[in-house]
Image (tube, grey):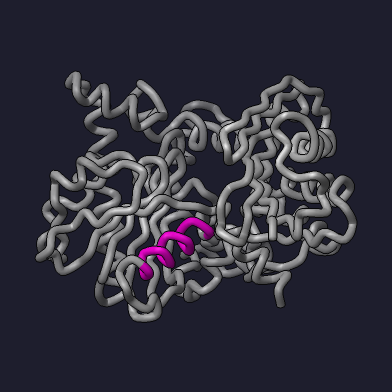
């Protein structure tokens, strides 16, 4: 059985075709620069590649090229789209409307589009891609939507509400939603497996660290709190996002710089974080390189990140009344040993001890990096959101 997984952005269409018999990737690629000009990059599981400039006025043309590339030419992997059992789509914002994976009916797609106000960069492109996919993919192939936010719908009211007038929640749905739910659900599930434990018995802090980062408290397999909020801007300092900031500081900056609301949003989302503090780059690898050369602002950026991770681990351990494991994932979490070490050092009070040498040797692979006498296990587990979407899709169509 083959599942096609789609992750659509405003100008891109990332995809993976997965064989669910052994969960191997048959092919993957990206149709990008949609609405600008167009390019497809495609790679098969056996190493064949196809790259071409294309004309992608809309997502529909991108899907047509995707189908053509999968079924014809030197990098084809299937004879026709009839070989695909279903298509699974990643959707960023499901709000309180969608708490679980569901079929992408026309009504569901309209509701996803209606939620664009809560995720303007993501949800409208998702809806465009869903409609385009339904127009191109054979009618009998089920389309399934998996929501980033649904994992966090188990948060209690005390965790997701803000201390602002309640009418803002009632009228405008202002509350903490959380993101990266698919990643947090995948790595905590995998963590339980490698620990040989039932996830229902575990208290875990999951650290998804990348250009966008979030930390989630997972108790008994359910999210009880998370660092991102109403939007993916809240929480940790990130590549270009500021993370948690006093709201009065925002209005003060807005006034001083004469910024409009949209300009303020761009300032905090695209010009802040690692880039804004360091003045060097939004990429953690560049920050680490600058640290080696003694750059003060790069060191400050690195210190801010590890300090904030440490605070979240501590606060979430308190919220769960205990801690069994910490897991690191995402581009930074999987590859930046210095970030993992900085976040876990001087945490003896919590029973967290990591083996420095093992930690330094781990990049992009599943490994336990805590010492044998550490009361809390610390792991690195590469995330695989596409595989979880495929699993969810298969589970739904198999009911």
Identify the residue at image location x=80%, y=62%: 142
**Position of residue 11 measured from the top left corner of the image (x, y, whole percent):** 70, 33
Residue 261 visible somewhere in the drawing: yes
Displayed quadrant of residue 395: bottom right
Q: Is residue 190 magenta?
A: yes
Q: Quadrant of the N terminus?
A: bottom right
Q: Position of residue 299 (x, y in %)?
A: 22, 30
Front-most of residues 178 and 198: 198
Say which residue appears at 75% left-offset and 45% top-offset: 78
x and y, in percent, of residue 298 in the image: 26, 27
Residue at the image position 28 percent from the left and 60 percent from the top: 313
Q: Is residue 222 above or below residue 90?
A: below
Most common secondary structure along the magenta stretch = helix
Q: Is residue 158 left or right of residue 307?
A: right
Give the answer, above or below, for where 66 lies relative to 340: above
Query: Dividing the image into 4 quarters, which one contains the C terminus?
Result: bottom right
Nearer to us in this view, 107 or 174: 107
From this view, report whether residue 60 is shown above or below residue 287: below
Q: Which residues are magenta?
A: 182-193
Left or right position of 328 against 131: left
Query: Which residue is at 35% across, 32% downward?
Result: 284
The quadrant where residue 274 appears: top left
Total labels: the figure holds 0
**Residue 371 x/y as whole percent:** 13, 59
Asked if residue 174 shows in the view, the reply is no
Q: Is residue 74 magenta?
A: no
Residue 259 occupies quadrant: top right
Left or right of 337 in this view: 87: right
């Amino acid at each position: 059985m083959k599942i096609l997984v789609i992750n659509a952005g405003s100008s891109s269409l990332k995809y993976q075709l997965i064989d669910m018999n052994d969960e191997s990737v048959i092919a993957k690629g990206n149709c990008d620069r949609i609405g600008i000009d167009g390019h497809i990059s495609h790679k098969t599981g056996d190493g064949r590649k196809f790259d071409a400039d294309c004309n992608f006025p809309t997502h529909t043309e991108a899907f047509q090229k995707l189908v053509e590339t999968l079924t014809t030419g030197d990098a084809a992997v299937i004879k026709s789209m009839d070989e695909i059992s279903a298509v699974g789509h990643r959707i960023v914002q499901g709000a309180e409307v969608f708490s679980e994976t569901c079929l992408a009916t026309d009504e569901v797609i309209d509701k996803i589009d209606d939620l664009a106000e809560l995720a303007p960069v993501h949800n409208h492109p998702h809806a465009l891609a869903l409609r385009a996919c339904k127009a191109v993919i054979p009618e009998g192939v089920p389309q399934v939507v998996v929501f980033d936010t649904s994992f966090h719908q188990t948060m209690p009211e005390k965790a997701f509400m803000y201390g602002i007038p309640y009418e803002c929640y009632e009228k405008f749905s202002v509350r903490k939603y959380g993101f990266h739910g698919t990643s947090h659900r995948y790595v905590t599930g995998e963590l339980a497996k490698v620990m040989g434990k039932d996830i229902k018995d575990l208290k875990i802090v999951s650290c998804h660290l990348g250009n966008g980062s979030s930390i989630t408290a997972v108790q008994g397999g359910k999210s009880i709190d998370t660092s991102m909020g109403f939007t993916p801007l809240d929480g940790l300092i990130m590549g270009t996002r500021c993370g948690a900031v006093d709201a009065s500081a925002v209005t003060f900056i807005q006034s001083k710089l004469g910024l409009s609301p949209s300009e303020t949003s761009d300032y905090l989302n695209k010009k802040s974080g690692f880039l804004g503090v360091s003045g060097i780059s939004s990429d953690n690898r560049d920050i680490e390189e600058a640290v080696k050369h003694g750059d003060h602002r790069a060191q400050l950026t690195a210190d801010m990140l590890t300090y904030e991770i440490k605070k979240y681990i501590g606060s979430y351990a308190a919220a769960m009344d205990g801690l069994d494991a910490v897991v690191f994932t995402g581009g930074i979490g999987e590859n930046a040993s210095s970030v993992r070490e900085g976040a876990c050092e001087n945490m003896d009070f919590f029973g967290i001890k990591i083996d420095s040498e093992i930690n330094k040797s781990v990049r992009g692979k599943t490994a336990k990096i805590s010492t044998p006498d550490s009361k809390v296990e610390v792991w690195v587990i590469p995330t695989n959101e596409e595989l979880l979407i495929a699993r969810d899709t298969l589970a739904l169509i198999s009911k």
